[in-house]
Image (cartoon, helix red, strand yellow):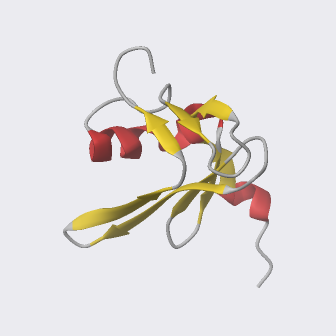
Amino acid sequence: MNVDATVLVSDGNAVGGLLAALFGQDMTGTTRVCATCAHVAPLGRHRAYRGAGIVLRCPSCDAVALVVVEEPGGASVTVSGVLRLGAGS
């Protein structure tokens, strides 16, 4: 079966609702400092890949930034780098 990978790729804004549900606030404007290249960008600018879970990748170097796996009864979230939460993030 051939799958067009571009259909599964969007930006971080497309998963904003899920991130807000998990973190309890809008996360699309929350900045992240990449652990690989030190690029600083809001999560809304990261590329989002959907598959068995959701993977956000750095818009600069394509390193994995955040992984969400939804499971019955909850979700697992793995973050690489630094998330700047709170006012003035």
Reply above or below: 83 against 69. Answer: above
Outermost top residue:
88
Where residue 66 appears, as percent x and y from the top left, is 52, 54
Where residue 13 appears, as percent x and y from the top left, is 55, 35
Reply above or below: 64 against 27. Answer: below
Outermost bottom residue:
1
Question: Relative to the observer, which residue lies in front, 59 or 85?
Answer: 85
Q: In the picture provided, is 36 more to the left or to the right than 52?
A: right
Q: In the picture provided, is 9 more to the left or to the right than 68?
A: right
Where residue 85 appears, as percent x and y from the top left, is 38, 30
Reply above or below: 26 against 54. Answer: above
Q: How many marks?
A: 0
Look at the image and tell me in which quarter the N terminus lies: bottom right
Look at the image and tell me in which quarter the C terminus lies: top left
Q: For the point 24% across and 73% down, which residue is it?
A: 72
Q: In the picture provided, is 14 more to the left or to the right than 85?
A: right
Where residue 38 appears, as percent x and y from the top left, is 68, 40
Q: Quadrant of residue 55?
A: bottom right
Q: For the point 24% across and 64% down, which residue is it?
A: 74
Outermost left residue:
73
Q: Quadrant of residue 63?
A: bottom right
Q: For the point 43% across and 14% down, which residue is it?
A: 88
